[in-house]
Image: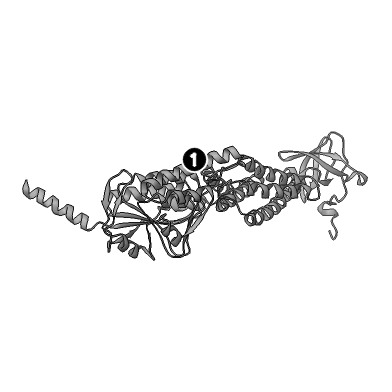
Amino acid sequence: MKRAILALSVVFAAAVANADVLRVPVDDMIHPISDEFIGRAIDAAAQRNCDAVVIELRTPGGLADSMRAIVQKILHSKVPVIVFVAPGGSYAASAGFVILESADVAAMAPGTNTGAAHPVLLGEKMDDIMKMKVENDAAAFVRSITQKRGRNTAVAETAVRESKSFTEQEALTQKLIDVVAADIPSLLRAIDGRSIQRFDGTKTTLHVANKPIVDYGMSVKEEILSRLMDPNVAFILFSLGMLALWAEFNHPGAVVPGVVGLISILLAVFALNLLPMRFAALALLLAAFALFALEAKFATHGVLGIGGIICMIIGALFLVDGPIPQMQVHLMTALVVSVPIGLIAIFLMGLVVKSRKNRVTTGSEGMLGEIGVAQTAIDPEGKVFVHGEIWNAVSATPIAAGQRVRVASVNGLHLRVEATTAASEPTGAPTVLPPHQATGA
């Protein structure tokens, strides 16, 4: 028994000695995929018995719900969490500021900044009362975090109420962060041996200097979904998907445009479902394609087409009501996508409308209206020469041999014809002569 306990102690000691530091790069907006990724990384660090998790943060901000979920995961992490705004030139604004303040150790690299955490209500302009409510709620949330972490609550609150931003030195001087370091190894050396108080009140001493740093990356699924969460990407996918379905509906049987269009639209809808989407803007995008169809069908001299392009641009600009500019469709994206797609949709629909107006020239329907010559007398049956071939024909009235006839209908291998004269033949009708009357016969 003693030998078993000793062996387990040796294994445990070796595991602790070999514990590493998990580096989690977050270089994106704060959204549900960021929340999922950080949560998975924190759970993995606990399972690996890591000494610490370093979230290398670079973000313009993002959604408040995702930010609160990330903060909750950091506060309840079994492994100490270090949030490091890096590399130089990076920033952690808005939601990123709150995540930075929630860390066990908050750090920034030289040449970085943080702050500007004023809340923005989605979907409407805030009146004074609503603005006060939202500000007070956000300020209370920041106070509750910074008080527990022993940071400067009053200064942190100004980032919420007054949208103040701070350089790394200003943040360090005003006790918003704990350390300034050039990179992760120097950061770990700077905090090695430091005693920190966890959010639950317990104290832990950090032993992280010269520990192996292991990178923890997104899964393939998270990488794909993170790219889709860009409103510009979602808008482009939706627009191209609609255009592809448009082509499939107008050219049934092409298959490929239909499959590509359906997949693109489903991916776009999935991303938009996770983003603060406006359904009125989505209706504008659908109305744009309806106007493109009407422009091709009716001669409006471009009025409906221009209206469709305008609807598409406005719909794109208001499609995602994000709290920061990075979570909205850019004007340039709206213009570059809407104008070409509008012109292409009108062009394709115009081709379809013209093709449907053209007379059928193949198959049994292509025989209708053709002009031929009676080879024999038809009373009521006989032979006619039509379209370079001799056919069996029937007629309700007697027709003499050599008289011109018009095909009225096709029934299997028999034609129903009627007598015609040169005056009654349609303009441009072909003159069909039997072989023995052809020139040079």
In the image shown, does 117 or 297 lie closer to the viewer?
A: 117
> Tag 1: residue type?
Asp
Question: For residue 206, what is the image quadrant?
Answer: bottom left
Which residue lies under the disc numbered 1? 137
Question: In percent of the image, x 75 and y 50: which residue is there?
Answer: 306
Question: In percent of the image, x 21 and y 55: which residue is there?
Answer: 16
Q: Examine the rendering and report whether any part of residue 290 can be seen.
A: yes
Q: Where, quadrant-wise, is the N terminus in this rendering?
A: top left
In the image shown, does 413 or 104 lie closer to the viewer?
A: 104
Question: In percent of the image, x 45 and y 46: which residue is there?
Answer: 67
Question: For residue 297, what is the image quadrant?
Answer: top right
Question: In percent of the image, x 44 and y 58: which residue is there?
Answer: 171
- Left or right: 293, with 12 as reference point: right
Q: Where is residue 403 in the image (x, y as percent from the top left)?
A: 88, 44
- Left or right: 138, with 438 as reference point: left
Residue furthest toward the left?
2
In the image shown, does 425 or 156 lie closer to the viewer?
A: 156
Residue furthest toward the right?
423
In the image shown, does 120 or 42 lie closer to the viewer?
A: 120
Q: Where is residue 168 in the image (x, y as percent from the top left)?
A: 44, 61
Question: For residue 262, what is the image quadrant?
Answer: top right
